[in-house]
Image (cartoon, helix red, strand yellow):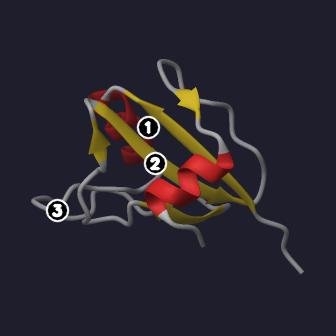
Amino acid sequence: MTTWTMLAWHGPPATVEAALRALGWHPPEEAPAIAPPPGIGGLLPAPGMPLPVLDGVAHAAVVAREALPTPPGLEPTDSAEAAALLGSF
């Protein structure tokens, strides 16, 4: 059985977008640029969906086989807040 970890981050939209792009995400107006790296089980928002931005702050979540470091310029999001804003896997 595989154990998954859900990580949630928030920060400036461009910074969240760059972090997600490195994991295989793309915005609605673009085709996929890369496949998700091994060990990534899912992204919220899903590839092809827009970033949720509230009061100028973007939010995202990643399910991975192991904990990933928080990307530079982003902050971890409390799991309850992430679930309320993004849903869960």
Sequence-earlier tag: 1 or 2: 1
Q: Compared to 58, does 27 lie above or below?
A: below
Mark 1: which amino acid? Answer: Ala
Which residue is at a point 18% across and 64% down the rendered structure image? 31
Identify residue type, mark 3: Pro
Q: Earlier in the sequence, mark 2 or mark 3?
A: 3
Q: Looking at the image, can residue 13 be seen?
A: yes
Residue lying farthest to the left in this orientation: 29
Residue 50 pos. (x, y %): 23, 56
Q: Residue furthest right?
A: 1
Taking 82 as reference, is 39 left or right?
A: right
Compare residues 7 and 47 and report the one nearer the observer.
Answer: 7
Query: In this rendering, which labeled residue sits more in front, label 2 or label 3?
Result: 2
Q: Which mark is residue 28?
A: 3
Q: Position of residue 4 (x, y in %)?
A: 77, 65
Q: Which residue is mark 1?
A: 19
Based on the displayed image, in which of its 4 quarters is residue 30 positioned? bottom left
Residue 60's tag is 2
Which residue is at 62% across, 30% downward? 70
Mark 1 and mark 2: span between their CA atoms?
9 Å
- Give the Cα separation between the discs numbered 2 and 3: 15 Å
Q: Is residue 42 above or below residue 82?
A: below
**Residue in the foreground of this view, choosing between 60 and 56:** 56
Q: Is the residue under label 2 in contact with that under label 1 (CB below 8 Å)?
A: yes
